[in-house]
Image (cartoon, rainbow, N blue to C red):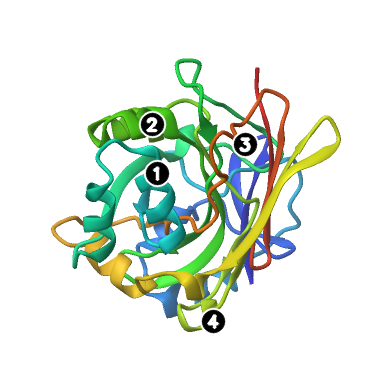
Amino acid sequence: MNLWRTMTDSGPRWCVDEDMLTKDVSLSSLLAMPRDQMLAVMRTAIATPSGDRTAPIDRNHEVWAAGVTYLRSRQERESESIVADVYAKVYEAERPEIFYKSLGWRVKRHESEIRIRRDSNWNVPEPELTLIINSRREIVGYLAGNDVSSRAIEGENPLYLPQAKTYDGSCAIGPTILLTTEADLANTKIELKIERAGATVYEDATDISQMKRSLGELVEFLFRETSFPNGVFLMTGTGIVPPHPFTLAVGDTVTIKVGESTLINTVAS
C-alpha cells in the first residue's frame, strides 16, 4: 500500500493507492494509531483523488536526521573537518548523532526545487532512507529523502551543524510513502545521480547493509526523552558523499532512488 497527499478545492487530502481517504484523516491522525488500526482506517478509502500531488507530510510534522551512520560518511566528514576525531568518536560511540532537520511546511516535494546556501562554496545532496515512524515507535513506511547540506559550514566547526543542515530548500522527500516494516527494509539499495547541462557529473550507489547502526537502534535513540504523538520522519544517514571538490551548482538535477521510491529535484537559483 502507498500513502500520498493531493491538493483539492477544499484543501489537502490523503490517498491510499488509487483511492482518497475521508476528509478528517490526516497523516498525523494515522501515525497516532497502532499499525493495525492505521491499516484498518486506510481500507476505508471512498473516493477517486484528483488534483496535484504535494509532499506526503503534514505541515507540523517534524523531520529528524541521523549522521555518521555509514563508514563512508565518517571518512568524508573527517576529511572535511579540522576536528576529524569528533566524527570518529561519533561513529564508534554507543550514542548516535541525531539532529532536527525540518518541519513539514518547509519540506520540498518531488519535482520541485531544492537550494544551496549562498554563503557556502561546498554543498552536496545526501540521499537517505527516510523512515516514517508512528507514536508507538513502529516503523510503518519509508521514502527517499535528500538531506541537502553545506559541507563547508559543517567542516569549519561541528557546532555550525544547524546552519549547515537547516535552511530554506534543504530538505526534500519522495512523492509517496511506501508502507513497510523494518524487516522488509534489509539491504535496501540507495542510488544517487547528479546531472548538469544534460550530462551525468556524479553517480554512486550503496545499500543499508553498509550502515553501522540498525534502524531500530536509531528509532530507539530518537524517542529517548522525546515523544512524537503524531509520528515523525527520520532520515537515517548517507553512505554516498561526493568527494571534494565536487559541489552542487544552480540548475543541477538530483535523482535519488531508495528502494522503490524515486525523488527528483533541481537546484534553484
- Residue position for label 2: 164
Q: Residue at x 29, y 72 (%)?
A: 217
Quick one: SS at disc 1? helix
Q: Earlier in the sequence, mark 1 or mark 4?
A: 1
- Image coordinates of residue 35 in percent, x first then y, are 42, 75
- Image coordinates of residue 22 in percent, x first then y, are 58, 57
- Residue position for label 3: 10
Q: Is residue 1 left or right of residue 157?
A: right
Q: Quadrant of the C terminus?
A: top right
- Residue position for label 4: 184
Q: Residue at x 38, y 31 (%)?
A: 164
Q: Earlier in the sequence, mark 4 or mark 3?
A: 3
What is the spatial separation of the Cα atoms under label 3 and label 2, in whole angstroms? 37 Å
Q: Earlier in the sequence, mark 3 or mark 2?
A: 3
Q: Is residue 262 left or right of residue 130?
A: right
Closer to the camera: disc 3 or disc 2? Answer: 2
Q: Earlier in the sequence, mark 4 or mark 2?
A: 2
Amino acid type at image mark 4: Asp
Closer to the camera: disc 1 or disc 4? Answer: 1
Against 253, residue 188 (above or below) is below
Quick one: SS at disc 2? helix
